[in-house]
Amino acid sequence: MAEVDLMKRWPGETDEAYPDVFTKMPPQPKELKPGQLTQEQVEQFFEEGYVIVDDFFNRDEELEPVKKEIEGMVDDLANKLYAAGKIPEAYTELDFFNKLTAIDQAMPGAGTLLHKQALMPQSVGRVWSNERLLNVAEQLLGTSDISGHPVWNLRTKTPQNEASTVPWHQDSGYLDNDSYKVMQLTAWIPLLDATKETGCMQMVPKGHRSGKIAKHHCCWRDTWYIMLEPEEMKETLGVDVKDAVTCPIPYGGLILFGNTIPHRSLNNTSDKIRWSLDLRWQRSDRPVGFYGMKDGVQMRTSQKAKVEIDWDAFNAVTRQEKSDKELHVQDDEFSTTIAGPWMKKWEITHVNRHVQAMLDAGEGGTQWHGLAG
């Protein structure tokens, strides 16, 4: 009987647990570097699984350039879709918080195209390799040998859009099983005040403490997102969604969390787009768990606090192009369908167009767009 049960297990399922990786606080510096957290904040991160820093960035110098560059990307997308006859106009009169909504209404799923580009804007690269953020990563990871994880995301959370409302999950549910024993630090950074109305994050405190990855299912509604059921969360992780904490973050702030805490994002019920970034770091000597598709990018070493990063080389290997090449797929440049290797890790309990794309592809690589928030 035991053998039969094991045969029924999905690739993502395991009994392994690494609580110390996610709960044991590394030795803290006697003198804090710029940007580093207080003792109380560090303790909260390892005890609760997350910590909010309300006022971290210089908004004008660090985040406004990001918004400006993204605005240019939206303009380029609008012009491209208009030229192809996909939308009736380029919506030149609309601003950063409204234009993509109009585009998405004219061509449902158009926001996904921006998400699928996966090219690192220079301004985002500067934030990701920000000295103060790397100081925080050093403090929480317990090492000065730090790499940026290859999965970063620009979130285009348009109002009342199911495709951008993310169900409960653990980030490692999207990665291969090598990630289960590696602390991967995420900074989730909103580009406006993230509130319950605009669709901020929710965390389940202490959901990381078992050091386990619970069983997920694929896929939620008409999306490519995996989902972690509340009953499974309680049984495997020992926490209850009734204890979930809503985490509003002001513009200029961030929330830090690891890859094992259950979290989700709320629906955007406002009338403007909730733009956000999620950026990740880990120890350079640990596997990134990215299915061999792309390596991390070295950002700091024990010898060099600031590594010169070749962003052109990083952008040269894009997630979609890499996976399409492995799969021998000719992806329509205007396709809003997303599929990924995480779909093969878990039981498929709902087939939609995204899941069907993975099933049609058969064995091999697939597009990558996960770790949602």
Image (tube, rainbow, N blue to C red):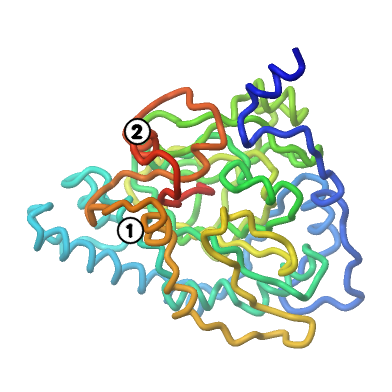
In the rendered image, which quarter is residue 202 located in?
top right
Image position, residue 276 (x, y; %)? 47, 57
- 326 horizontally vs 14: left or right: left
Q: Give the image location of residue 165, x and y in percent.
A: 44, 39
Residue at x 23%, y 63% (from the top left corner): 77
Residue position for label 1 = 114
Asked whether residue 189 is in view, the answer is no
| Tag 2 residue | 356
Disc nearer the start of the sequence (2/1): 1
7 versus 194 height, above or below: above
Task: For mark 2, give the secondary structure.
Answer: helix
Q: Quadrant of the N terminus?
A: top right
- Return the residue nearer the eye: 15 or 110: 15
Of the pair 193 and 212, the residue shown nearer to us: 212
Taking the spot 42% from the left edge, 48% from the top edge, the residue there is: 366
Indicate the amino acid at tag 1. Answer: Leu
